[in-house]
């Protein structure tokens, strides 16, 4: 369990450092070159993309428990993401899907509000917790 936890923490640290480094560089040069007065809630939008990445990391860890090869892990992760994306085309359930966060850039241009993404953020947080617990439990039970 300790080894699994260390791997997950290390991947999340790398994801966090490089995501926010990339965000800082991008935000900085956008501030320098273009007028940003019409942009609202840039940190919220970035945070949603960050959370989406954490969900994908958790999904990769869970897929690693369920699959034996790297190709299968990538296929499962991509498949779940694709299914979530395609289900997002149905407006009745789209606001509850993790991939709904891909549209968070609409908040920047004021064509959507933060509250439009609350349901998706709650669901994705729950999925991250469930997937992490399942992955750690699966790694512990898996015979190496």
Image (tube, rainbow, N blue to C red):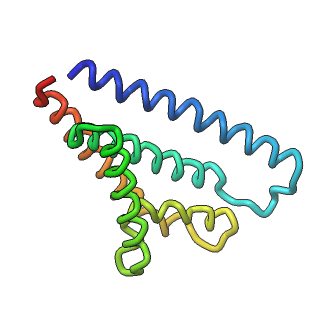
Residue visible at 35% across and 51% down in the picture: 75
Q: Can residue 46 be seen in this view?
A: yes
Residue visible at 44% across and 62% down in the picture: 99
Looking at the picture, tell me which residue is in the foreground, 102 or 95: 102
Q: Please indicate whether residue 111 sits to the left or right of residue 96 in the image.
A: right
Could you tell me residue 56's position as x and y percent? 40, 46
Please identify the quadrant where the C terminus is shown: top left
Could you tell me residue 114's position as x and y percent? 54, 63
The extreme top residue here reads: 2
Residue visible at 65% across and 33% down in the picture: 21
- Which image quadrant is residue 27 in? top right
Q: Is residue 122 visible?
A: no
Q: Is residue 125 above or below residue 102?
A: above
Residue visible at 13% across and 30% down in the picture: 142
Q: Is residue 55 above or below residue 87?
A: above
Please identify the quadrant where the N terminus is shown: top left
Q: Please indicate whether residue 80 sits to the left or right of residue 49 in the image.
A: left
The extreme right residue here reads: 33
Q: In this view, does 92 lie above or below 22?
A: below
Q: Is residue 70 above or below residue 1?
A: below
Q: Please indicate whether residue 129 sits to the left or right of residue 102 in the image.
A: left
- Which image quadrant is residue 72 in? top left
Q: How many labels does the image show?
A: 0
Could you tell me residue 125's position as x and y percent? 35, 50
Looking at the picture, tell me which residue is in the foreground, 27 or 118: 27
Could you tell me residue 25's position as x and y percent? 74, 38
Looking at the picture, tell me which residue is in the foreground, 137 or 111: 137
């Amino acid at each position: 369990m300790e080894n699994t936890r260390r791997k997950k923490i290390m991947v999340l640290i790398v994801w966090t450092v490089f995501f926010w480094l990339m965000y800082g560089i991008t935000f900085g040069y956008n501030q320098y070159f273009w007028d940003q007065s019409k942009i609202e809630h840039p940190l919220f939008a970035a945070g949603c993309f960050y959370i989406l990445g954490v969900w994908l990391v958790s999904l990769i860890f869970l897929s690693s428990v369920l699959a034996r090869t790297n190709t299968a892990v990538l296929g499962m992760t991509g498949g779940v993401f694709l299914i979530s994306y395609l289900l997002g085309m149905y407006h009745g359930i789209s606001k509850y899907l993790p991939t709904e966060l891909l549209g968070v850039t609409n908040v920047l241009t004021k064509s959507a509000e933060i509250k439009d993404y609350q349901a998706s953020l709650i669901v994705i947080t729950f999925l991250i917790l469930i997937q992490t617990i399942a992955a750690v439990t699966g790694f512990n039970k898996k015979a190496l």
